Each structure stands twice: as C-alpha cells, then as structure tokens.
Amino acid sequence: MPQRPAAGTGLGLALLSAVTFATSGTFARSLIDAGWSAEAAVIARVGIAALVLAVPAALSLRGKSHVLRRNLGPVAVFGLLGVATAQACFFNAVRYLPVGVALLLEYLGIILVVGWMWLVHGQRPRRLTVAGSVAALAGLVLVLDLTGAGRLDPVGVIWGLGAGVGLAGYFVLAARVDDRLPSVAMASGGMAVGAAVLVVLGLVGVLPLRATFGDVTFAGQTTSWLVPIAGLSLIAAVVAYLVGIAATRILGARLSSFVGLTEVMFAVLIAWLFLGELPTVVQLLGGALIVAGVALVRLDELRAGRTEVESEPGAAEPVLTGGER
C-alpha cells in the first residue's frame, strides 16, 4: 500500500516535468520573434537556471567535492554538446518550424544513440530496437511531408536534426559520468558551461548575440520581455529539472523516460494554444510514429535491463529530458 501513493506522486511529477520542459519552445518563440538570437535566448535560459540551481547543487556536493573535481572534463563536454549545442540548434529550428515539429526532429537523437552504440561499441540492436528505429525514420519522412502543403523549411530541418545530434551526445555523455555525482550538480554545472561557451563564442563574433529589452508578443498579448525570460529559465529549466529529478528517484530512470515522451504531445498542445501552431494531419501521424518508435527502443532497454540510452543525465541518477532539453 505505501508504494502506490509514491508511484502516483512520481507519475504526477514526471508529467509536470514533461509539461514544463515542453514550454521552452513557446517561450523562446516570443523572444526570437522580437529580435533575440537563438543563442542569446539559450544563454538567458541556462545561465539563469544554472545560478538558481547552484544553491541546491552546492548542498548536494557537501562532502563530495572530490567527485565533482574528477568529473570536470565530462561535465564540460556535456555542457558543450548536450546543453549548448542541443538547445541552440533547437531554438534555431523554432525560428523556421512549428515548435512540435522541431521537438520531434530533436527526439530522433535517441535513435542516433542506437546507431552510435552499434557502430562504435559493437552493440548490435535487437529486433524491437530495429523496429522502433524503422518506425521513427518512417515517421520522419511523414513529418517532413516533402510533397504536401505542410512542406518544411529545409534550414529549420537541418537545425532540428542538429538538435538531435546534440541530444544524442547528451545521452551518451551523461551515461558515462560518475553516478556518484548528484544530478542537480550535473545539471547546474552543464548549464553553466553551456552558457559560458555561448557567451565566449558570441563575444568573439562566431555566434550572433542579439537581445531586445522592450515589449514582446506572447500568447497574442503584449507583455514585458521578462515574462518569457522568466518562463524559459524558471519554468522550462529550474522547475522542469528539479521536478524531473524527484520523479526519477521515485519511478526510476526507465519508467520516467517513457513518461518523458509526453513532452512532445504537450509541446504540440502548448504551441497550438499559445501560438496557433498545429502540424498537418500527415505530420501528426509521422509524429505518432516517431514517438512510438522511441518508445519501442525504450521498451527494449527496459526488457533487457540495459543502460546505454538513459534519461537525463546520468546512468544511476539521471535528469529528465529536455532535451532542448
């Protein structure tokens, strides 16, 4: 009996995490439409979130500072690829694509991990994983809708697939970090590194850093630029990560990762309600195939008890999606 309320609480927290992560594209769109560069929006999101999470991260590291020192390299690479690259590519994709479609392209990163583990580590995928990968790739063809009225901007598609590469790196790198490193410290450190790298690249002129500080249009209403900034950093990052961590500790990594797939559904719903964006019927069918394919890959992992493709960001104590997280 005591386990049922815990499981129910964990499920509720996992769904809340998925909902809050799903708001990032909608918040970012209002800033990008107002003249912000995608990179500046990412810096605001992860930089503020890293500062807020620094306090719980420091508390979690009491007596474990040596663990952080041993993992500085992996955390730095994680921040560069899994945070900076994945989120910058996703926010750039949102400039050209509906939020839901951009997120679907990013989620293909999970399928890329299957190929990585096969080619680099010789871990041949089993039948269920192969079936899931084929379903996801078939879904990609439908989402792109190459011959229909919903044909997508190829520039946005490239950015979306770039986000998928970043997400794949996120999972691969996260699974290699010492599981004694607390998840909140991993998240805060990775986001701090990601923000710092983007700032440096912006200052030297490699990446565009543009921000405006007037009113923006959000959900059809004119409001201060601080509203989407607060949403991006506090709702779509701090709350999403902390709630996701709590859910993972109750449900476990694999079950939480299944629930995390609802992020795509919530992202489409939120973009429809606030931005009036809705994919075509063909794209929705393709999205269903992608989600189903990813779910099959996750199910195969669950059945085999393997840990190559874990939820964010560690093998034993991951932080959930996000992918754009």
Image: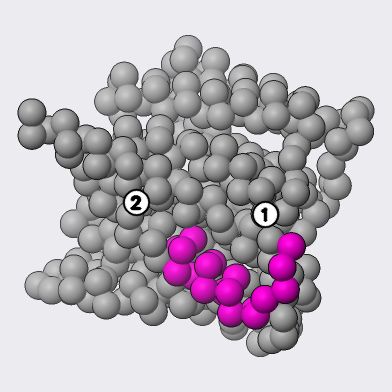
Q: Decide: is 8 above or below 317.
A: above
Q: Residue 274 — which label?
A: 1
Looking at the image, is mark 2 or mark 1 earlier in the sequence? 2
The residue identified by callout 2 is: 244
Q: Amino acid at mark 1?
A: Phe
Which of the pair 210/206 is nearer the observer? 210
Q: Amino acid at mark 2?
A: Gly
Which of the pair 18/89 is nearer the observer? 18
Asked if the stretch drawn in magenta spans residue 325, the answer is no
**Residue 116 visible, this angle:** no
SS class of the residue under badge 1? helix
Q: Quadrant of the N terminus?
A: top left
Left or right: where does residue 222 sit relative to residue 189? right
Q: Residue furthest front?
A: 221
Distance from label 2 to label 1 (Cα)? 24 Å
Residue at image coords 91%, 33%: 149
Label 2 with label 1: CB-CB less than 8 Å = no
Q: Residue 34: x and y, percent?
A: 77, 74
**Residue 63 visible, this angle:** yes
- Closer to viewer: mark 2 or mark 1: 1
